[in-house]
Image (cartoon, rainbow, N blue to C red):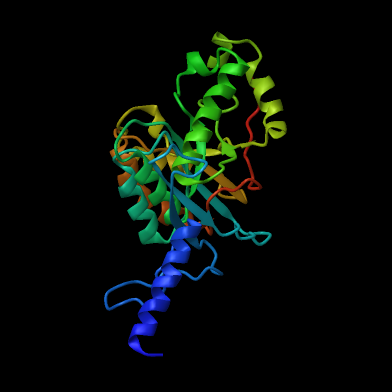
């Protein structure tokens, strides 16, 4: 095939792809200094494409469409630690992601709505690095979301739909603000937590609590040493499944500082790290309202 024929053939393929409205992936060998990405058959493979003005977006807007590989099956007897970060994304998210990448660790981010310019990009970055996004709350306003069951579902659905528009992901794992055992909800609606937890499965969701925590919720800026020690002391290291509660907000700089020591400690205790999926151990609390 001469050069002109090759150019014409390439143009025809490009035009066909554009006409069909599909993204075109550039398949080539990485040049010097680049890192080759995972193959589609690798666990944790992530594909990111973009779609403009499709059915899930407003005309003229762009949504990332991210497809992840099915979660890997955890061999029986494996000790698993699931690091979870609530309330992000924040300015600390890239720092957390960098540490997780340095240690080869996956985690789960229970996010809330933010108006910050970095909001969508940090969501995409989190997924692209093989972590799990999960739903926390759109407003995180206890008085609003726990005023009635309809108010709660309206808030959660609003966040679900927003994340789906921004990332293309239909997220079905969630965490109640305050956990399922919270009692503050009783101040707004008696018995609401019982009703909500009972309805989760029928609405297609799985909720996750935690069975250890790093203590960063005890104040805006707990010391790094406090967080490390609290993470260690709160966990039963004989347990096969640990879900650790941490937070990802602008104020939690010491959480970032403590993270390497937390990872190293639990690795030394024989734990592997993973991201939660719908079928993971949920560490449900006892419901108190």
Which quadrant of the figure has residue 25? bottom left
Total marks in image: 0
> From what the image shows, is residue 157 above or below residue 127?
above
> From what the image shows, is residue 8 above or below residue 204?
below
Q: Is residue 49 left or right of residue 149?
A: left
> From what the image shows, is residue 208 above or below residue 45?
above
Q: Which quadrant is the N terminus positioned in?
A: bottom left
Q: Residue at the spot x=33%, y=86% of the render? A: 3
Identity of the residue furthest to the bottom in this view: 1
x, y percentage for residue 156?
A: 54, 28
x, y percentage for residue 22?
A: 48, 58
Q: Is residue 167 left or right of residue 171?
A: left
Q: Can see residue 231? A: yes
Q: Can see residue 273? A: no
Which quadrant of the figure has residue 116? top left
Front one among 128 and 278: 128
Q: Is residue 61 left or right of residue 223?
A: right
Front one among 194 and 257: 194
x, y percentage for residue 272?
A: 53, 58
């Amino acid at each position: 095939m001469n050069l002109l024929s090759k150019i014409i053939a390439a143009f025809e393929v490009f035009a066909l792809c554009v006409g069909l409205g599909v993204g075109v992936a550039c398949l080539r060998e990485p040049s010097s200094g680049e890192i080759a990405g995972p193959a589609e058959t690798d666990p944790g493979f992530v594909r990111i494409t973009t779609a403009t003005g499709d059915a899930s977006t407003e005309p003229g807007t762009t949504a990332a469409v991210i497809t992840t590989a099915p979660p890997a099956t955890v061999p029986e007897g494996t000790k698993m630690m699931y690091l979870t970060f609530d309330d992000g994304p924040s300015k600390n998210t890239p720092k957390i992601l960098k540490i997780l990448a340095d240690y080869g660790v996956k985690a789960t981010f229970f996010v809330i709505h933010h108006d910050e310019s970095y909001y969508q990009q940090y969501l995409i970055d989190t997924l692209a690095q093989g972590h799990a996004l999960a739903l926390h709350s759109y407003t995180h306003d206890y008085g609003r979301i726990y005023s009635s069951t309809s108010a709660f579902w309206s808030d959660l659905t609003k966040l679900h739909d927003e994340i789906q528009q921004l990332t293309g992901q239909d997220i079905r794992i969630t965490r109640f603000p305050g956990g399922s055992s919270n009692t503050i909800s009783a101040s707004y609606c008696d018995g609401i937590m019982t009703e909500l937890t009972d309805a989760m499965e029928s609405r297609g969701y799985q909720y996750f609590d935690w069975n250890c925590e790093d203590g960063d919720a005890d104040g805006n800026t707990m010391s790094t040493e406090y967080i490390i020690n609290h993470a260690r002391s709160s966990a039963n290291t004989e347990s096969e499944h640990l879900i650790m509660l941490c937070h990802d907000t602008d104020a939690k700089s010491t959480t970032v500082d403590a993270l390497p020591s937390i990872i190293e400690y639990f690795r030394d205790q024989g734990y592997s790290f993973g991201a939660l999926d719908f079928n993971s151990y949920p560490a449900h609390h006892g419901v108190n309202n």
